[in-house]
Amino acid sequence: MMKKVTIITPTEYESLVLEALGRSRVTQLKEVTGPGFEELKDSKGVDYQELYEKVHSRYLELMELGAFTIEHKMPTLEELRRLAEVPEDEVNAVLEELERLIAQLKEVREAQSVETKKIADELQAAIEEQNAAYEEARKGLEEKRLKLEQEGKQLAEDLEKRYVTVKARLEAVRALQADELKSCLAVGIVKNEFIARLEEYLKRYPDLSHKVVSISPEESILFINGSEESRRWVGALMLVFEVKDISEVLDTREGLLDLDAEKLKEVLERYQGELKQIEEELKRADQGKAFESKLSELEEKIRRLDETHKQNIEKLKQQYDARLKQLEAKHAQEIEALKREQTEALSKVAYMDYLLRILSDKRAPVLRTKVVSVLQGWIPEKKIPVLEKAMGEVESKTGERLFLQFENPGHEDHNIPTPEPEFKPSFLQPAWKLTTLRGWPSVHEVNPNYITILIFCFQFGLMYGDVGQGAIFLLLGFFLARRYKKGMMSKLGVLFIPMGISAIFFGVLYDSVFLIEGMLTHHHPILPNPVEHTTKLMLLVFQIAVVEVVAGLVLGAINEYREGHKWGIIGEHGLGMILYVVGLYLSAMYFIKTGDFMAVLSHWTFIVMVSGMVLAMLEPIISAVAQHNFGIEVFGEGVGALLMTFVEGLANLFSFLRIAAFALAHASLAIAAHSMAHFMGVGGLLLMNIIAMSFEFISSSVQSLRLLYYEFMGKFFQGDGTPFRPFKIRNIRRRVI
């Protein structure tokens, strides 16, 4: 039950009252209405929003500058009176105080910033100087190492060149040991790539013969024999193919072509010795032993230089870090001293900003006069002690009594909010979403919090009765409800719990466990088997439909009475529809029993059905006469009510047949699972259970919602209420500014 609360306080204590209301969080404030307050509405008020913006903008600047903790300090009662009487003057005084505090903080911060920047600049200059010296020293060592490496490379190239030359001479001398080659027509050094083409030309002259002796991978010695007439042509040919003179390989000063065999042997041995010596030098050069010591020494110097530079930089940083820590300690002492000086002023400014924020809150429509401030709101009856305690605290602070009145809503009160119900057990609280998806109940309506859960899960179990699958959804519901405390997953988890319990209960009645029938009662289920006894199940569903619809109509009649429509309880939302639905069901049962339609028309059940339609037609007419608002149009309303009763009641009953249809679908899946298990084994049974727990589960849930929202809740629930949203503010606490 909601109560309207009215609070009247002296204007200077308005902020304290709003603060207490915000902390208690049990009252939804509203515009002040009622006799005695109408003439006060034209009184001019203070624009606290503008004042708050002035103070808060400077207060934010102060918070950005500061870095210490303060405690709010409530202004004195005299200061609160000045704030109520001359708010602009009091705000200007606060602004002046803020300007003074900001100036002091800026001065300290700027001095701290200058000192910190000075130390940082000194550190940067020292590091740059150290880096410059390091780079210069390292550059010199790198140049020395590069020069040494180039010298080693040049030495290796010279040795390689000597090796090729000596080897060519050695091969040439070996070739000269044959006596028949001493009288050759031409001798020269030819590149190996030209030999094939050169031989093609030489073969064109039968009187010429030649011999090729390789002296290196790139070159060979070419010996050509023939008649004196071919000398000129051979010379031209050797010129074309760039055949070098033999003297470029052999030392002509030694006269090797004229030496005898003994002398050639000596020369050959000398070349072999020289070649061996060069090979040994090349081997030592390849191993790098000639320069290894010098290179290692240079690399060690570079390494030591790098380590020394790194150590020097680290020392510089440590030195300046120590200076910065000393500076920070000094700054902390300065801030602490400033804190002691400004504590009282800061506390007052912080609380004043807080009070102005409360006074400017648009969620608190306060009726202000020069003497008093009036607040009105809605509060659940059971929360009244909480509000009385909060107002008692305000009275103890101020030493004055506040006017506090609770009363029932009047006819002039509209949009009375409805609080969210508290579920027992509390873990069912997220299931309230099942009701709010249809609408929010008004204060005059029956709150269907438990009813919606019960009806929804009951209908779902009738369609989806299976012990094993229900147990899985029950466990899944416990898991989701435990893991998720907010969001849609938490609501689904909570709903899965009663849905799983309902599926297990009806699974026992249907004798179905994971689509396997006959495990519990040996094919003697308590409820009719949807496949074997479809007609019995349909008759049972009709009985359930009548009970649900009549229950919804009873709740609808109660709501009509609560809303002041006393004659509405006999119309299409009350007794009229109840008689029609009951009479329709009993008439249908009598017809099934007798098979005589004419007998039904004279039976008392048919009279009950017709009486219900007549009552539905008469209700608008009786209401109009009772309200002295009778007109010809009410007869049209009566005829419309009669037709709606006839069509809607009939449609509602037949709509419930979807329960039997989906129960039959579940039983059909059990038959299919039995068949597939014969030729697929456990895999076939598993496949059908997966289908049932996905597609059938979703369709059964949707159809249960449809029956809940339209066939049942449509009889009594309008859902056009307003949610209860109490006025809230953050509690006063220490703040870091």
Image (cartoon, rainbow, N blue to C red):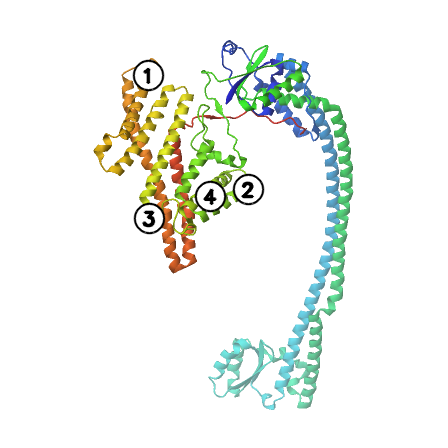
Circle 3: element type: loop
The residue at the point 38 percent across, 55 percent down is 674
Q: Which of the image's four quarters has the C terminus? A: top right
Marks 3/2: CA distance? 41 Å
Where, by quadrant of the figure, is residue 445 drawn?
top left
Q: Amino acid at mark 2?
A: Arg
* Residue that badge 4 annotates: 500
Name the side, left or right, on which 349 lies relative to 505.
right
The residue at the point 66 percent across, 70 percent down is 157
Q: Residues within 10 Å of mark 2 (few under 14, many from 20)?
A: few
How many numbered circles are shown? 4
Residue 113 visible at all? yes
State the residue in front, 391 or 609: 609
* Residue that badge 1 annotates: 624
In the image, residue 216 lies at what x, y percent? 60, 78
* Residue that badge 3 annotates: 532
Q: Marks 1 and 2: CB-CB under 8 Å?
A: no
